[in-house]
Structures are given as structure tokens and as C-alpha cells.
Amino acid sequence: MKRIVTVSIILLLFVQVVIAAEFWGSKNSNKYHYPSCEWAEKISPANKIVFKTPEDAKQANYIPCKVCQPPLAK
């Protein structure tokens, strides 16, 4: 039973990440992050840039964060 609950929680978290595909960058950096990344949470609202896809971030010359490891642009 415990294993089923654990797997269910992991799947729910994964689905939320896929559905809410959004990435954050800062005007003061060249990296993009998952919103839950410790570094993304430190971005001030005035400096936050929202990307819908990794491709959008790449087009703006941003690279993936090495901590949260968001997907690379295709």
C-alpha cells in the first residue's frame, strides 16, 4: 500500500510539471529554471522572465540551470 501511495505522488508531481510547463529566467542572468528551483525562487518579480518552452529560452540566449536541470531545447 505504501508503494502505491509513493508511486501515485510521484506521478502526480510529474504530471503537474508536464502540464504547467513554464520556465523562469532573470534579466540579470542567462539561465532558465523550473519555477520550483531554489534559484528561481530567488528571482525578484521585477526581474523575472517567463518562458513557455525551452526553445523560447534558447531563442533568448538562456541556458538550462545546472541545479534543477530543465529540459534542453530541441
Image (spheres, grey):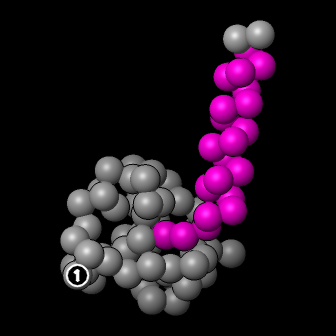
When asked about the image quadrant of residue 4, the answer is: top right
Q: Vertical placement of 67 versus 9: above or below?
A: below
Image location of residue 53, percent across then percent down: 60, 77
Identify which residue is drawn at 57% across, 78% down.
52
Residue ID at (50%, 79%):
51
For badge 1, the amino acid type reads Ala
User: Residue 9 magenta-drawn?
Assistant: yes
Residue visible at 70% across and 11% down in the picture: 2
Displayed quadrant of residue 18 = bottom right
User: Is 65 above or below relative to 9?
Assistant: below
Q: Is residue 43 magenta?
A: no
Above or below, comparing residue 46 to residue 4 in the picture: below
Q: Which residues are magenta?
A: 3-23
Can you say whether 58 is above or below 17 in the image? Answer: below
- 10 with respect to 66 (left or right): right
Labels in figure, total = 1
Circle 1 Cα neighbour tier, 10 Å, few/some/many (<14 / 14–19 / ≥20):
few
Q: Secondary structure at mark 1?
A: loop
The front one of 23 and 46 is: 46
Identify residue for label 1. 46
Tell me which residue sits at (49%, 69%) in the image. 23
Quadrant where the N terminus sits is top right
Magenta region's main secondary structure?
helix
